[in-house]
Image (tube, rainbow, N blue to C red):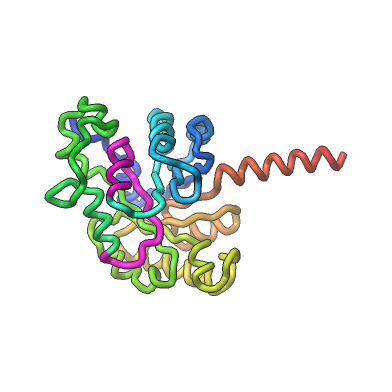
Amino acid sequence: MPAPVNQFKVDLAAAKQMYGCWAGFADPYATEVMGTAGFDWLVIDGEHAPNDLRSITAQLQVLRSSASHPIVRLPMGEEWLIKQVLDVGAQSLLIPMVESAAQAEGLVRATRYPPEGIRGSGAALGRASMFSDLPDYTVTANAQICLLVQVETVAGMEALDDILAVEGVDGVFIGPSDLGADMGYPGNSRAEPVQAAIQDALSRINASSKAAGCLATDGDTARRYRDWGAQFLAVGIDILLLADAARTLAAGWHER
C-alpha cells in the first residue's frame, strides 16, 4: 500500500480556496476540539507554541479522523527536525524565515527520500508508514509531501521571485507580524507600507505556480488578504479565540 494521498496538496494544486486556523495550545484535547470546527486546515505550531515531537505526534493522531488537514510548523528548517516530524506522520510542513532560493532548495531535499533528497530511510518503525503496514510508503511518500515556506523578512521579499522558481515548494506563506517588525513596524502589520508589501507579495505568488497563504486575526483583514489572492488563509488563532471569548464573557457579567 502507498503513502496516503495528501488531499491538502491536491486542493492547493486545484486552486481551491481554503480557510485554516492556528492550533497553539500544544495539547491534543484542544486540537481535537479545533478539528471539529470545520476548518480546512490547522497549523500545529512548533515555532511559537510549547510543542515538542511527542505533543505534535499526539495532535496528528487526534486529527487523523478530522476533515481539517494538519500542517506542522517547525521552529526552523533543520534537516533532523524535518525527518522526525515526517516519520511521525506529518505530510504538510510550514517552515518559517525562508530568505533565499538556496534555503528553499535545501528544505525540498530534506523532505524527500533519495535520489530526490536526503531524508533518512527509517519510516519502517514510524507512524508515517503505519509501523510498516504501508509497505510502499518509502517509494511513494515524496509525491505526497506538501512544503510551505514562510517569507516574512525584507530579505525574503527581495528573494521571493527566486524562491517561487524552486521546484518542490508547494506554497509561500507571508508572515505579516515578522515582516512588519523587519520593515520597522513592530506590532503594527497594518501599517500602510507593510500592507503594500503583503499585497505585492501575494500578487507575485499568484502569478507563479505556487499557492499563496497568509494569516489574519480579524475579519476585515482576512477578507482583504483573500481578495489579494491568499488561497490558504488562516483566519484565527485558537488561543486568541478562547482569550477573547472568555474576557468578553467576564466583562459582560461584571457590567451587569
Say left or right for 147 vs 96: left
Q: What residue appears at the point 51 percent right and 73 percent down from the top-left corner?
A: 183
State the image coordinates of residue 196 (x, y, percent, origin top left).
51, 72
**Vertical relation: 134 (above or below) 199:** above
Say left or right for 225 vs 170: right
**Vertical relation: 165 (above or below) 56:** below
Q: Quadrant of the N terminus?
A: top left
The front one of 11 and 183 is 183
Residue, far right = 256
**Vertical relation: 189 (above or below) 23:** below
State the image coordinates of residue 136 (x, y, percent, origin top left).
15, 33
The front one of 94 and 216 is 94
Magenta segment range? 80-102
Say left or right for 246 vs 45: right
Say left or right for 251 vs 115: right
State the image coordinates of residue 193 (x, y, percent, origin top left).
54, 74
State the image coordinates of residue 61 (x, y, percent, origin top left).
39, 30
Does the magenta-highlighted stretch encompass residue 94?
yes
Quarter location, residue 170: bottom left
Residue, far left = 115
| Total marks placed | 0
The front one of 140 and 208 is 140
Does the magenta-highlighted stretch encompass residue 64?
no
Q: Quadrant of the C terminus?
A: top right
Q: What residue appears at the point 31 percent right and 46 percent down from the top-left corner?
A: 9
